[in-house]
Image: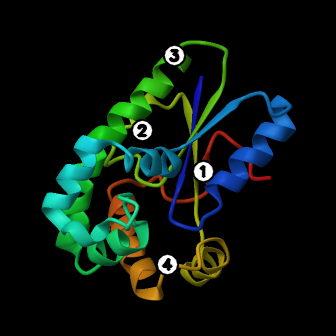
Amino acid sequence: MILGIVGMIGSGKSTYARQYNAEHFSGKAKICEADSIGHEILKNTLFQNRLRNQFGNDIFSSLGNIDRNVLREKACRSASALSDLEKIVHPLLKKELLHILRPYRKTEDVLFMVVALPFSLGLFEYFDEYISLSVEKEEAWIRIQNRSPNISRKQFEVFWKRQEREYSLSDNSKNEGIFPLI
C-alpha cells in the first residue's frame, strides 16, 4: 500500500510521515522521501555531466561532488533555470521513486511516499491513499530557516512559487485525503 504525503515546502510532510508511522504502524512502515532520493541522484556520474553542461563546472566542490548550495543558487536565478534543473532531475528521480514504490503496489506492506511535486513527477496516480498538507507561507519560511539555513529567502520564494503552480493544477491542496491530522 502506498500512502502519499504531499504538500508545499515546509508543510511538515516528513514529520507527519514519521509521527503517523509511529502511531499507526509502530514505526514499521517504510518512509521514502523524494528529496533524499534526489540528493542521492547527485552522485550519479551521467547526471553530474548533464548538470555540468547546463550549469557549469563551478557547481562542483574541490572534492568533485556537486555543491548543492551553488547549484541551488544557479537554479533559483529564474523560473527557466529551475525548469532546466527539473528537466534533468525529474526523469531520473521518477525512475528511482517508481523502482522504490512498485513492490508496495497491491500489498499490505506500507510505504509512505513523501513528495512535494507529485503531479510533475507523475506519482499521484500510484498512491492508494494520500494526504495533502498545507502551511502558511511565513510558517514554512520559519521551518525552512530552522531546518536548512543555507536556503535564502530568495531561493525559498522561487521554490514556493514553483510549488504553488504544482498545487494550482489540482484541488488537492488543502489538508484532505484519508489520513486524519495528528
Q: Which residue is mark 2?
A: 124
Separation of residues labelled 2 and 3 (CA atoms): 16 Å
SS for tag 2? Answer: helix
Q: Which residue is mark 3?
A: 103
Point out the frontmost of discs 3 and 4. Answer: 4
Q: Position of residue 35 (x, y in %)?
A: 49, 52
- Front residue of this view, candidates 47 and 136: 47
Q: Return the residue found at the far left.
A: 53
SS for tag 3? Answer: helix
Q: Position of residue 144 (x, y in %)?
A: 59, 74
Q: Which residue is mark 4?
A: 151
Task: Check disc 2 and give the amino acid type.
Answer: Phe
Earlier sequence position, callout 3 versus callout 4: 3
**Residue at x-position 69% and y-position 46%:** 17
Separation of residues labelled 3 and 4 (CA atoms): 34 Å
Separation of residues labelled 1 and 4 (CA atoms): 29 Å
Point out the frontmost of discs 2 and 3. Answer: 3
Q: Are marks 3 and 4 in contact (CB under 8 Å)?
A: no
Q: In which quadrant will I find the N terminus?
A: top right
Separation of residues labelled 1 and 2 (CA atoms): 14 Å
Point out the frontmost of discs 4 and 2. Answer: 4
**Residue at x-position 33% and y-position 32%:** 95
